Amino acid sequence: MVSPWLYTSPSNMTYEARNAVTLNGVHPSLRYKLIQLLDLLRLNGEDVLLYEGFRTIDQQNADWQVGRDIDGRVIGTTITDAKGGYSFHNYGLAVDFAPVGPLGVPLSKRNMLEWSAKARYEAIARLAQTLGLEWGGTWPKPDKPHLQYADGLSITAVRSGKRPDAEKAKAGLTAYYRNRITNAKRGLKHADADRTKELDAFIVDLQTKLNAL
Ligand SMILES: [Zn+2]
């Protein structure tokens, strides 16, 4: 569903800068998963804006109030059924995404966001699901922009302080980078001069990312 917060954030930020802000705010277990997802998406010619990640309890309560009266009765279009403390966003374990246009284009409602792109949402979600992320699009009341990483934990467990294993997620991302480096090195054996240059740069880039983990 279209987020009312999407257009209220600093409009001079590119989506990449905004993605970095979102990534910084989420739990490390989700961050590692999302870094891998963003990489996989780009390999597939796809890209996303991660427009919201961590959400405070106060913000969650304010969101819950939208479309409801002071007694909590629904009087209009609601945007969430979760009160403060009952959303995975409140623990940095969820993000909301939107497919975006060509790389590097600054965030703007007019040229960046393709809300109607059902097929793109589904393709992105499928990739996310292969990484163990849960997609809100499968829920009885679908929430297509929503991805969360609970690794089997219920919201009750999360509320009691449990979190997905960040080291496990990190190990997954490390293995992913190593695998891609191995494949690129394999490609070098049959590459011409131009391709060799390309693959060398690619390997340096991956190695830098791996070292930064
Ligand atoms: Zn969400």
Image (tube, rainbow, N blue to C red):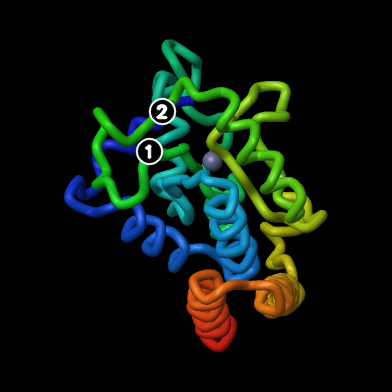
In this picture, is 43 found above or below 138? below
**Residue at the extreme left:** 12
Asked where in the image residue 119 lies, by quadrant, the reply is top right
Q: Nearer the viewer, residue 43 or 63?
A: 43
Say which amino acid is labelled 1.
Gly
> Residue 103: x, y in percent?
36, 49
Mark earlier in primary sequence (2, 1):
1
Contact (CB < 8 A) between labels 2 and 1?
A: yes
Q: Residue furthest right?
A: 152
Q: What's the CA distance linking mark 2 and mark 1?
A: 8 Å
Q: Amino acid at mark 2?
A: Glu
Q: Residues within 10 Å of mark 1 (few under 14, many from 20)?
A: some
Rendered residue at 23%/54% (across/down): 13
Element at label 2: loop
Query: Is label 1 within 8 A of ligand 1 (CB to nearest ligand atom)?
Result: no
Q: Judge from the rendering whether residue 84 lies leftward or rightward of residue 173; answer left or right.
A: left
Between 88 and 172, the residue placed more toward the observer is 172
Q: Position of residue 56 (x, y in %)?
A: 43, 54
Q: Which residue is mark 1?
A: 101
**Which of label 2 and label 1 is nearer to you?**
1
Q: Is residue 116 left or right of residue 165?
A: left
Q: Compared with residue 136, is residue 50 higher up or lower down, i.e. above or below? A: below
At horizontal 58% and vertical 72% (from top left) the residue drawn is 192
**Any mark on residue 14, and which?**
none
Helix, strand or loop status at disc 1: loop
Q: Which residue is mark 2?
A: 114
Screen quadrant of the C terminus: bottom right
**Ligand 1's quadrant:** top right
Res. 48 visible in picture: yes
Residue 128 position (above or below residue 201)? above
